[in-house]
Amino acid sequence: MTLAEKIISKKMGREVVAGETVEVDVDIAMTHDGTTPLTVKTFEKIADKVWNPEKVVIVFDHNIPANTSKAANMQVLTRNFVNEQGIKNYYKGGEGICHQLLPEKGHVLPNTVIAGGDSHTCTHGAFGAFATGFGATDMGYIYAMGKTWLKVPETIRVEVSGFNERIYGKDIILKTCKEIGRSGATYMALEYGGNAVKNLDMDDRMTLSNMAIEMGGKTGLIEADDTTYEYLAHAGVNNSKIAELKKERLTSDYYDEQIQNDTYHDVVEFDITDMEEQVACPHHPDNVTDVSNIKGLEINQVFIGSCTNGKINDLRVAAKYLKNNEVHRNVRLIVIPASKAIFNQAIAEGLLNTFVDAGAMICTPGCGPCLGAHQGVLGDGEVALSTTNRNFKGRMGNLNSDVYLSSPAVAAMSAIKGYITNEHEKY
């Protein structure tokens, strides 16, 4: 069985197979300031009380601080709902991005089902959870009933081998997007494995799972292991629960050659040993090329942050190149840590001083310019290099601009040079 089939089978108490439609109990349900209002509209047609206020998580992260009166009014509605329903897990703004906060605060556990009112909820598959995004109508039903229906997805195995110190999780997932294509994994689970994935820390693993949706994926899964359990312990999950999770650890049957061909829809394999850093060109995340093919392209803005690459290790990597350097005079560098905890850690390690000294602007933990709402909207004809997950036309707020995607390393080096590059003199 695939990892997706095993997780859903465990929830159902019986074996399931790809293509089967099931109704499953939801362990954690999350919406943010942008999706809660429509969720509430549906919820109120079904019930008066959420099914379990301790299993609902509401995060303000997309338009924080509010950038328009419309956004502010939506946030008022959401706050009223939180208070009326007694929602315990409420993050009012400045705490960080929902996809970072859920695991950071211990809400994400292996073998669970997580439903989120945001497409990048698949991020939590990095912990061996079946995590996926839903629209507001579905989330309203989930808030009321605590369950949802799913079609058990087929699975594409992504087997990544080799070692290359210049290649990060972002490079691996951009390469994967190129190989599979923007709709090549529609309603499928992406199951990441291989020694290159095994060697990644949780920050980079979350980056892989985060962008499963950019290929149409339902979720992006990585088996839980010691790296996972160490992260959970740091997030405050108690030792007895971690011991229980270790005993119930689920693994895919990928390496059983007798069943491999019958179990997986497809297998994508590549080796990173000699791979170049990857960059996604406008206007899709699968329009990916080696950095050398576009080296020298002048840029106007660099953004380091988002649920994809605003984690502490991302900031450490960027700071390594920016230390004792200056951002190019024609480039605006924006850095936004993915959570308050990361912000504080970056202060403690001197990373924010490095960014500010280099000429960067630091903003409130949240989504910021990723969705094009505020904190870095582009001008006509401008070119941005971003560590986010999407570069659709107009994604960063202007239809007449271009957005390229890269790792924090390439972003930092490019911010110094004023053009896209993987070159550096010192760090």
Image: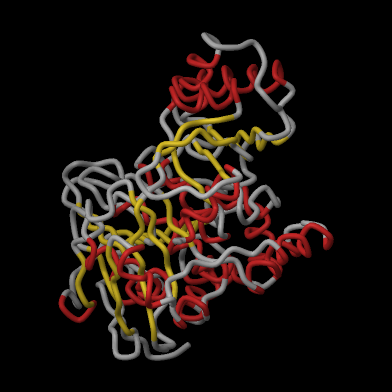
Does the image show residue 374? yes
Q: Nearer the viewer, residue 154 or 120?
A: 154
Vertical arrangement, residue 107 with respect to residue 172, above or below: above
Question: Is residue 216 rendered to the left or right of residue 257?
Answer: left
Does the image show residue 364? no
> Image point 52% across, 22% down: which residue?
141
In percent of width and height, residue 285 lies at 26, 57
> Image point 47% across, 25% down: which residue?
71
In percent of width and height, residue 188 lies at 34, 51
> Image point 65% across, 34% down: which residue?
92
Question: Is residue 73 rendered to the left or right of residue 105?
Answer: left
Q: Nearer the viewer, residue 348 or 258?
A: 258
In percent of width and height, residue 404 lies at 26, 61
Question: Is residue 211 rendered to the left or right of residue 234?
Answer: left
Question: Is residue 4 rendered to the left or right of residue 79?
Answer: left
Vertical arrangement, residue 277 with respect to residue 149, above or below: below
Vertical arrangement, residue 420 with respect to residue 96, above or below: below
